[in-house]
Image: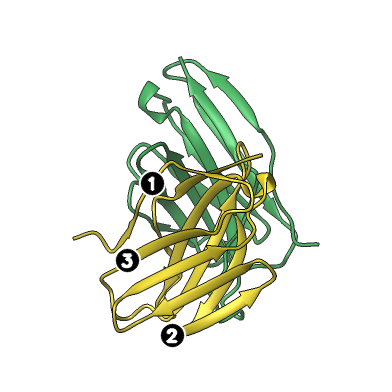
Chain colours: A yellow, B green
């Protein structure tokens, strides 16, 4: 079993839709959970991070972590064409230098 | 503003050439990383460095080497480029003083080996 599983998509939605992006993981040592957004031909940039279980909201974006199920989600409300990008989940156990990444989900929001 | 700069955005090289990819960060970060990103394979760690002159192999170091002579600069070297090294290369940095593990990425260097 891979440490982090993420459905690669592609996911195509109409403008205004609610988008749900998900990752599952197997390593119970992970404590920090991140979502990166990567526009085409650009480097990833941090969108949100969450420590341990719970929810975190930032504008139209909500990140959820369920450590008991080893499942994390990113919700995008009122999606916009500018949200079209690849979204990568990433996780860190806090004890070494390396993040563990999902493979990314390609999202297209159609006007 | 936080900045990781990769000197070349697009490169085309021939098989067997020596290739240098340069990365500079201005955040005084101790940790620096080189990843490659390929469709369907995601981000794969090639090498990382947690201090000047220190380096550790990542998941796919074969065919690559690195150099970190100064804190702000981390170079990736392909001693003899091969076609299977055609990829997007991403440099990143982080600080152990930040307890989130957040990585700051450059914009990437797209290398084509013919």
Position of the C terminus of chain B by quadrant:
top left
Label disc, if present, on residue A53 of the rendered structure: 2
Q: Residue at x 38, y 80 (%)?
A: A66
Q: Position of residue A8 (x, y in %)?
A: 38, 46
Residue lying at 40% horizontally and 62% vertically, measured from the top left: A22
- Crowd rating for badge 2 (residues with CA inside 10 Å; few <14, some 14–19, many 20+): some
Picture quarter with the N terminus of chain B: bottom right
**Are discs 2 and 3 located on one and the same chain?**
yes
Residue B89 percent location from the top left of the image: 52, 40
The residue at which mark 1 appears reads as A8
Residue A97 in sight from this viewpoint: yes
The residue that disc 3 covers is A24
Mark earlier in primary sequence (2, 1): 1
Q: What chain does badge 1 belong to?
A: A
Q: Quadrant of residue B27?
A: bottom right
Q: Choose between B13 and A42: the one closer to the eye.
A: A42
Neighbours of disc 1 within 10 Å: few (<14), some (14-19), many (20+): some
User: Is B69 displayed left or right of A90 in the figure?
Assistant: right
Q: Is residue A110 above or below residue B53?
A: above
Work out how far the residue at label 2 is from the one at label 1, CA to CA, in angstroms.
24 Å
* Discs 3 and 1 carry the same chain letter: yes
Q: Is residue A44 visible?
A: no
């Amino acid at each position: 079993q891979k440490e982090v599983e993420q459905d690669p998509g592609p996911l195509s939605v109409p403008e205004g839709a609610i988008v749900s992006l998900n990752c599952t993981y197997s390593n119970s040592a992970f404590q920090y959970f991140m979502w990166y957004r990567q526009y085409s031909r650009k480097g990833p940039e941090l969108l949100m991070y969450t420590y341990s279980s719970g929810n975190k909201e930032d504008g139209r974006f909500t990140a959820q972590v369920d450590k008991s199920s080893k499942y994390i989600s990113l919700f995008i409300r009122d999606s916009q064409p500018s949200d079209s990008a690849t979204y990568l989940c990433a996780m860190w156990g806090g004890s070494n230098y390396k993040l563990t990444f999902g493979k990314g989900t390609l999202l297209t929001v159609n006007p | 503003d936080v900045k990781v700069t990769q000197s070349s955005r697009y490169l085309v090289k021939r098989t067997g050439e020596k290739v240098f990819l340069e990365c500079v960060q201005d955040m005084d970060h101790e940790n620096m990383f080189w990843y490659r990103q390929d469709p369907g394979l995601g981000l794969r760690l090639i090498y990382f460095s947690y201090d000047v002159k220190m380096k550790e192999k990542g998941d796919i170091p074969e065919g690559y080497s690195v150099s970190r002579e100064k804190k702000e600069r981390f170079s990736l070297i392909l001693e003899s480029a091969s076609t299977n090294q055609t990829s997007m290369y991403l440099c990143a940095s982080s600080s152990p003083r930040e307890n989130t593990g957040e990585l700051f990425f450059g914009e990437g260097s797209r290398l084509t080996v013919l």
